[in-house]
């Protein structure tokens, strides 16, 4: 791709909207993960006795282990959410934008 095509894409308002949308979505997912992780860290710091409780009487697995697994599940879910959105919305929009730019360049 030549520099003129890159400049044409960068100046396109649809491209700018797509980049802004992707950035907002990425920052939102990042904020959710940060809140989840640091919430857990604060919970460990402020209420470790609650995390140390067994799940049920006689259990060796604690609430903390379950919460830790929950954090991993949240991270996987957020990653999956991004992949689904990228595959369904962001990638097709970018492909259409590239195709239209290349068609305009060939005229």
Image (tube, grey):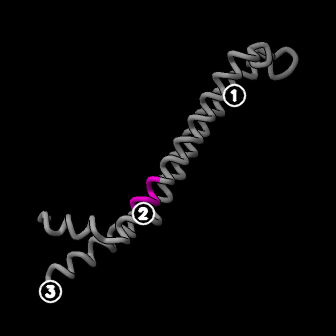
**What residue sits 20% from the left and 64% below the top?**
6
The answer to whether 97 is drawn above or below residue 70 in the figure is below
Which dot marks residue 107?
3
Label 3 environment density (alpha carbons within 10 Å; few <14, some 14–19, many ≥20): few
- Tell me, yes or no, whether the two marked residues, 2 and 3, touch with CB atoms within 8 Å: no
Magenta highlight range: 19-23
For label 1, the residue is 67
* 61 or 3: nearer the viewer: 3
Comes first in the chain, label 2 or label 3:
2
The residue at the point 50 percent across, 59 percent down is: 85
- For the residues carrying marks 2 and 3, which lies nearer the camera in this image? 3
Q: Estimate the x, y position of residue 27 in percent, counting from the top left.
A: 50, 47
**In-front residue for pair 56/102:** 102
Q: Is residue 6 above or below residue 74?
A: below
Q: Secondary structure at mark 1?
A: helix
Q: Residues within 10 Å of mark 1 (few under 14, many from 20)?
A: few
- Is tag 3's residue or tag 1's residue first in the polypeptide sequence? 1
How far across and down, in percent of the image, does residue 55 sit?
Answer: 81, 22
Q: Is residue 101 above or below residue 63?
A: below
Q: On the rendered image, what quadrant is the N terminus found in?
A: bottom left
Q: Is residue 32 above or below residue 91?
A: above
Q: Is residue 8 left or right of residue 81?
A: left
User: Is residue 50 shown left or right of residue 17?
Assistant: right
User: Viewer-proximal residue, 51 or 30?
Assistant: 30
Q: Which residue is mark 2?
A: 90
């Amino acid at each position: 791709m030549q520099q003129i095509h890159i400049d044409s894409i960068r100046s396109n308002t649809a491209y700018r909207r797509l980049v802004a949308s992707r950035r907002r979505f990425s920052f939102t997912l990042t904020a959710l993960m940060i809140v989840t992780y640091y919430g857990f860290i604060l919970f460990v710091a402020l209420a470790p006795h609650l995390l140390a409780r067994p799940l049920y009487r006689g259990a060796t697995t604690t609430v903390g282990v379950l919460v830790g697994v929950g954090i991993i599940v949240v991270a996987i879910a957020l990653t999956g959410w991004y992949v689904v959105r990228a595959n369904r919305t962001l990638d097709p929009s970018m492909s259409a934008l590239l195709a239209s730019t290349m068609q305009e360049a060939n005229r």
